[in-house]
Image: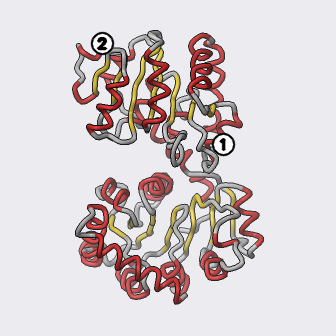
Amino acid sequence: MIIYDLAIGVYDILVHLDAPFSRKPRKMMKGHWVVYELLRQQLEPDRRYIWFHAASLGEFEQGRPLMEKIRARYPDYGILLTFFSPSGYEVRKNYRGADVVCYLPFDKPRNVKKFLDIANPCMAFFIKYEFWKNYLDELHRRRIPLYSVSSIFRRGQIFFKWYGGTYRHVLSNFDHLFVQNERSKRYLSKIGINRVTVVGDTRFDRVLQIRQEAKELPLVEQFKKESMVLVAGSSWQPDEDLFIEYFNTHPELKLIIAPHVIDENHLVEIIRKLRRPYVRYSRADEKNVLKADCLIIDCFGLLSSVYRYGEIAYIGGGFGVGIHNTLEAAVYGIPVLFGPEHKKFMEAVQLLESGGAFSITNYAELASLLDRFLSDAAFLREVGAKAGSYVTGNAGATDKVLAMINF
């Protein structure tokens, strides 16, 4: 306990020291300075609030289906949403599905008590990997119902180490843990945590929701026409080296690139590799988009809708730290390709096992697959159908969670 509090205190100091020199810590500290006043101003004194906490944007997307179903079914409750990371808060600070959105103050005992005294939630949901000891201890002491949603556990985590006793105790604070798979349940059972139900991952519900809400993009539709399109999402340079090489020599295939990093230097790198006509989305119009074979998405917020215009998806990151979101593409019932760094992502492994995706390690493997997709329509449809079925077959986690909560 002392070591944990000391570590949190040191982290707090480091963020303060770094704030004058770095934008992300600076935004975080500005958000922390106004949290308590924001809560006092925006929380209605006589209303009961359900608190959702997400580390960042990815966890928010996992919690979002649950938040929105609760809001629809139980409108008398308010929703308080907190983030740890600026990359989540800055994108979703105006999210209309919550009544109050703010940062979560650092997990120091004084902060915890002050936050809970003001917020006074009637229940709390922590999404996936969020296990802040002091918050969880205090919620338990105050007998505020506490749930973990879409959590996943692996053997190498500290909870299962011989020295992880303090962290194992943290898990006992939860009234219930809604985990993604049976393996997580088995690991928890071995350390005496048995208030556990396997419900799957709420991300499947979210991507189905995203598909229903997908934007119509007339310029992308104009670009596509009757052509076969490869959509490369969240790509990095090693990915681009492979699929651009193939695109350059296959005029029967059009390409949409939505790079993970959208800055001018990276866009120039991409353009230098292209040997066929291209246009950037921000500069596209009804005339020049018809002349292009490659469309570069140089803005944020469109990728999940762009996948609907593709026959094949390539997901970037697999030659670096790890692949990005595969489900946003698979939900449209199209084959999904990605690099070798995917083993930490359960949905990618299962998508491979389902036959709806392929992992490649070099250009020859990518070219072989794309050649077959271009020449074998039945194979293309079969793989795409398996990808789509994998997503729809794993939906429903949100309703399973709601069925076990007493409101």
Q: Please provide percent x and percent y for residue 293.
A: 36, 15
Look at 43% across and 75% down and name the residue there.
121
Question: Is 100 situated above or below 333?
Answer: below
SS state under label 1 = helix
Circle 1 crowding by C-alpha within 10 Å: few under 14, some 14–19, many from 20: some
Residue type beneath disc 1: Val
SS state under label 2 = helix
Q: Is residue 273 visible?
A: yes
Residue that badge 1 annotates:
349
Question: Is 239 situated above or below 135?
Answer: above
Q: Is residue 402 visible?
A: no
Q: Which mark is residue 290?
A: 2
Q: Please provide percent x and percent y for residue 316.
A: 49, 37
Is 195 in front, or is 131? Answer: 131
Question: Is 99 situated above or below 91?
Answer: below
N-term mark: 2 or 1: 2
Label 2, label 1: how far apart the Cα atoms are: 38 Å
Residue type beneath disc 2: Leu
